[in-house]
Amino acid sequence: MKTRALLLMALLSSTALMGQAQASEEKHKVGIQLSGGGAEYKGSSKDGDGVGQAYLYYNYQFSPMLALEVGLNGGSEADDWECTEENDNKFTCKNNDKPLFNLDANKLEYSNLVFAGKGEYYLTKNNSLYAKLGANFYDYDIKQNSKVLNSDDGVGLFAELGWEYDFNNGIGINASYQYMDMGDLDTFTLGVGLSYRF
């Protein structure tokens, strides 16, 4: 599964590099992306509640089709709330906090420093598909309340495929699929973002 996803991302990344370019005077872009999805730890997808994360990034556009990116990401497990309707339109909600990854753990926290290349394929003047490929320097903790059960840091793969639309005023929106390899921990998320080019 992981190998097929990486091959698909590499293929789309090389296709993006061969796309038609958009002439733009602006070389800089800053953005934020919020995403949610799932995680696997040592091959176990029993992640209980999934993950949520926020990604801040900066792009330098050194050619019409290619950019370099540096970003900061922070993520954690996402609590699963289950709500049931009582009477008279009153709802009762409870946290369905399942153990993470078949471990006796209820918390996951991770952070990433990302360095990546970005290739773009323009469908129209403002509308494009893109692929990002690079490395992430990660640090994560898997905890039971405040007790750390497993932790690790190191360097892993970062990959993202997406679509973006840049308005003429410099504001842009995007939707993406992102993958991060953090050693024994892998995350797969879908996100939406907002950016500004200047």
Image: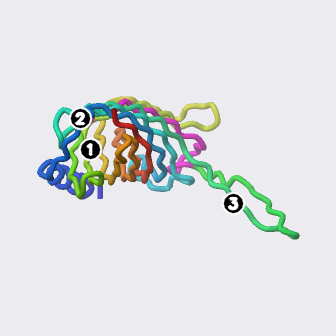
**Which label number is shown at residue 82?**
3
Residue 115 in sight here: no
At mark 1, the secondary structure is strand
Residue at x 40% of width, y 40% of height? 195
Residue at x 29% of width, y 51% of height? 126
Q: Horizontal and vertical percent for residue 143?
A: 57, 36
Q: Which residue is mark 2?
A: 25
For the residue marked with disc 1, what is the amino acid?
Lys
Q: Are marks 3 and 2 in contact (CB under 8 Å)?
A: no
How many C-alpha atoms fall within 10 Å of the one at disc 1: few (<14), some, or many (≥20)?
many
Per the image, is 24 magenta?
no
Q: Which residues are magenta?
A: 100-116
Side of 48 relative to 20 (left or right): right
Q: Is residue 90 above or below residue 184?
A: below
Extreme-right residue of the structure:
88
Front of the two marks 1 and 3: 1
Q: CA distance from mark 1 to mark 3?
A: 36 Å
**Which label number is shown at residue 132?**
1
